[in-house]
Image (spheres, helix red, strand yellow):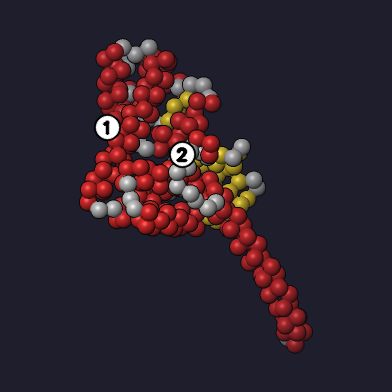
Amino acid sequence: MKTLLLLTMCLMPLASSVLAEEAPNEDAQKAEQRELIRKMFLPVLQVELSQFKRVGRPSDEVLQQAIDQGQKALTEFADKHATDKQNGQIMLGNVRAMVANGNVIQMGDGQNELSRDVLEVGIRQRLKPLLDDEQKKRYQAELDQLEDYKRDSVIDFIVNILDEQLNLTAEQHEKITKKLRETWKSNWEAQLQLLPNFERYLPTLPAESVRPYLNDDQLHIFSDIRQLNFTAHMQINNQFIIKDVELEN
């Protein structure tokens, strides 16, 4: 018993030392992931602030407040999703992802909270209260128009892919387009950023949006088209960003 107690007392400092060494490593990994996420999504903040400045036409004081609030939103976003790194992959929130050529590819169902859309919402929620009623009206109208354009552009792209494979009639084209607008999912946009690199692939589409409008031959072809359900979070090339609001990296 005395021997066991003595051995335990000797090992306790060693165990404490090991734990002390592991903690900084975990903190360093999390800090690395936080910085990766922040840099990857910084252009999103740049775009949001540029739009806020152009549409809202705020004073210099309000613009500085917007910059501060936007930076806070980005920092909170990065803090929330930074975890660890394993075997060349990273954990973004609770979803495993892979970094390749500066792009982060999420492996999973594409429904987690690490997305450009989520960050945009977080930034806009912080920016809107800085505007007066007239400015808010202009700003919201611009956001609504942007979302409509984004949705329609993605759906047109999807229907064109279907048309190439299925040779749709004008009536089929119109009905499928209308139904896809009704069943629209914003993560289709992110998936389509990656899918053009492959052949005969589509985002996972609701069956009721396409199948009821196809004939038997088209249904057979449609069944062979691979539909994938994942999200690609692509970095924005900084050279295409209008940098009319100065930000620190």
The residue lying toward the viewer, choosing from 63 and 1, is 63
Residue 32 relative to residue 222: left or right: right
Q: Residue at x 41, y 34 (%)?
A: 189
The residue beneath circle 1 is 182
The residue beneath circle 2 is 242
Q: Position of residue 110 (x, y in %)?
A: 44, 41
| Residue lying furthest front | 60
Q: Residue at x 45, y 36 (%)?
A: 190
Q: Position of residue 52 (x, y in %)?
A: 36, 46
Decide: is 117 above or below 7.
above
Residue 15 relative to residue 34: left or right: right
Q: Splitting the image into 4 quarters, where does residue 160 fall?
A: top left
Q: Residue at x 36, y 33 (%)?
A: 150
Q: Position of residue 26 (x, y in %)?
A: 62, 61
Q: Residue at x 30, y 39 (%)?
A: 142
* Residue 45 visible at all: yes
Label 1: few (<14), some (14–19) or many (≥20) C-alpha neighbours in 10 Å: few
How many marks overall? 2
Q: Earlier in the sequence, mark 2 or mark 1?
A: 1
* Residue 77 visible at all: no
User: Decide: marks 2, 1 in contact (CB < 8 A)?
Assistant: no
The kind of residue tagged 1 is: Glu
Looking at the rendered image, the quarter that the N terminus falls into is bottom right
Residue 103 relative to residue 51: left or right: right
The residue lying toward the viewer, choosing from 82 and 9, is 82
Secondary structure state at the residue bearing disc 2: loop
The kind of residue tagged 2 is: Ile
| Residue lying furthest bottom | 2
